[in-house]
Amino acid sequence: MKENRFKDYYNKLISNMPYPDQFVVMDKQHFYATEVFDSQVNKSFRALNLCSNDLFCFTENTRVKTAAMEAIDRLGASNSGAHALNGRSIYHQELERDIAQLKGMPYSHLFLNAWMAVAGFVNSYCHFGPPLPGFDLSKPVHIFADTLSHACQMSAANNATKPLGRKAADSPNVHFHLYKHLSAKDLKKRIERYCSVDDRILVLTDSVFSMDADIAPLPEIAAVLSNYNNATLFLDEAHATGMLGTTGKGLLEHYNMQPSDFQSLGIDLIIMTTFSKFAGSAGAAISSFNKEVIDILNFTPTSIGTISLSPPLCAATSESIKLLLGDNELPKRLRRNTQLIRDQLAIEGFEVLGSTPVIPIILPNDIHPQEFARKLLHEHGVWVSAVWYVSKPKIRIVANSELTVKQIDEFIKAMVSVRESFCMPIQKTCIK
């Protein structure tokens, strides 16, 4: 009899842990009026959506939607080609200029998503483009990543240790190391252990870590890398853009640093900006001061080997950036709502991690996040993310700038009510 390993694994999986619930968005008038179908109970619910990463509700913004529709009218829904062939349009050019204004980095290459962007960059950093006779590739490459860096970075680093589509003789030796979470001290120790001063060093880190919402120690990492001649720092700004800094420009603004500071330290800075959180769109960009870095990305398989970002997504993202840069009240409202939610949860005795609009909430040990989230949706019309299979079990929500005080109060009351349905009431805490 033919073996079905997928079926065997699936049956083993669901016998060992709850399988993630599967939802379908049926209709969306606003983030607070989302109709979501729960296949577990075969029923739709009208819900306040707190699991979306749409920080400023730009997916609902009239200007953003109009920009996307105008791009479709002008160029169609897709370029149907790779970036280096027929896949780059006037909307791609405009988005590259807007990213330069947002991040202070003059050159960018656009990708379909963050996974493809980081895979493309790391592959290009380690192995460049096509093999060239006489070009020395003997210098080893050492990649260092925070232990809690996003899986897209881990995957890219692991893949880079094996040459992609070429002979090993045409590529350098690539070594991948992990350092302790948020520890520049441990990073320094490991670089000193494995590298010489002239080795090529690439450090990968989230700016804001997506599961625990903590922030990378950028000044300390920069101080470590400034001692090496060929150091590159890659910042994944997926959860930093819009969230950090007075005007939402990200980790550098949070620390009152400029991209030029890294040039002064002799560090090559690479910033990955993703568009699904702050921009309410999709896609990603790799940005650099080095034009050659960006040009060589045309050769990477995740760019030349696939379709480019579509014109309507480029147009929508450009409009979102203009909205963010043109209204300093947006980040202020986001920070206000974030702090209000965090304070109210703490007052009600919930354990809350981090300090950003990504809000992880640790539940009592005997409450499974999936069961908790189901009750929130089914009984209170609040849709949150239940996390247990990729990190420590938790409820995860994302604040947005458009939440009202009333909606936040209703969410807090729902959280308390569901918790009390599982266990005894917990004493309130005083927030000074």
Image (cartoon, rainbow, N blue to C red):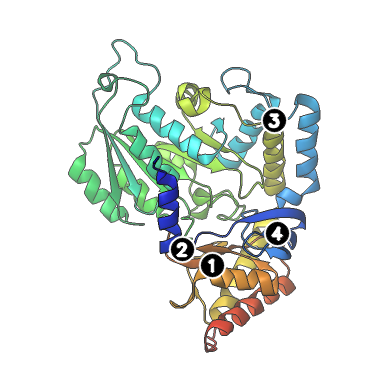
Q: Which residue is mark 3?
A: 311
Type of amino acid at the residue the image marks with label 2: Trp
Type of amino acid at the residue the image marks with label 3: Pro
Residue shown at 42%/36% (left/top)? Answer: 263
Residue shown at 57%/35% (left/top)? Answer: 112
Labels 1 and 2: the sequence-earlier one:
1
Q: Residue furthest top?
A: 133
Labels 2 and 3: the sequence-earlier one:
3
Q: Which residue is mark 2?
A: 388
Q: Secondary structure at mark 2?
A: loop
Q: Secondary structure at mark 1?
A: helix
For disc 3, the neighbor class at 10 Å (few under 14, some 14 to 19, many from 20) is many
Q: Which residue is mark 4?
A: 36
Q: Is residue 291 above or below residue 56?
A: above
Circles 1, 2 touching at the beta carbon (< 8 Å):
yes
**Res. 232 in view:** no
User: Between 370 and 98, which is closer to the camera in this rendering?
Assistant: 370
Labels 4 and 1: the sequence-earlier one:
4
